[in-house]
């Protein structure tokens, strides 16, 4: 269960940085410590 909670927190961080605060893809990946594809996947999922 810990993994799902951690993923949810990471996804919320990605959405906040990229969609709400308007950080660039590069800034978001560096701040969140994840790949560009993860940012794209999470944000595309949000739009659906």
Image: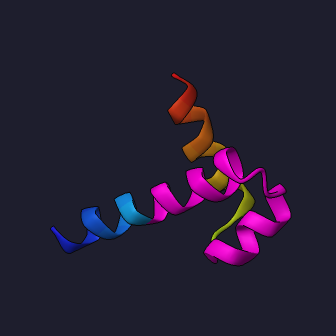
Q: Is residue 23 left or right of residue 42?
A: right
Name the spot of residue 32 as percent of width and height, x first: 62, 73
The residue that appears at 53% across and 62% down in the rendered structure is: 13
In-front residue for pair 13/6? 13
State the residue at coordinates (72%, 68%): 29
Percent position of residue 45, x then y? 52, 34
Frontmost residue, 6 versus 12: 12
Question: Vertical placement of 42 versus 1: above or below?
Answer: above
Which residue is most to the top? 48
Left or right: where 47 falls relative to 26: left
Residue 26 percent coordinates (x, y)? 84, 65
Instruction: Kindly indicate the quadrant of the structure image that contains residue 34.
Output: bottom right
Residue depicted at 57% across the width and 50% down the height: 15
Q: Is residue 5 left or right of residue 20?
A: left
In the image, residue 5 above or below residue 44: below
Q: Position of residue 24 (x, y in %)?
A: 84, 56
Name the colour scheme.
rainbow
22 in magenta: yes
First to last magenta residue range: 10-33
Q: Quadrant of residue 3?
A: bottom left
Which secondary structure class fits the magenta region best? Answer: helix
Count of marks placed on residues: 0
| Residue with the most extreme front position | 21
Quarter in which the N terminus is drawn? bottom left
């Amino acid at each position: 269960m810990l993994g799902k909670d951690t993923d949810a927190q990471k996804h919320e961080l990605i959405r906040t940085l990229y969609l709400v605060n308007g950080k660039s893809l590069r800034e978001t990946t560096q701040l969140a410590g994840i790949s560009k594809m993860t940012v794209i996947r999470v944000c595309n999922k949000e739009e659906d």
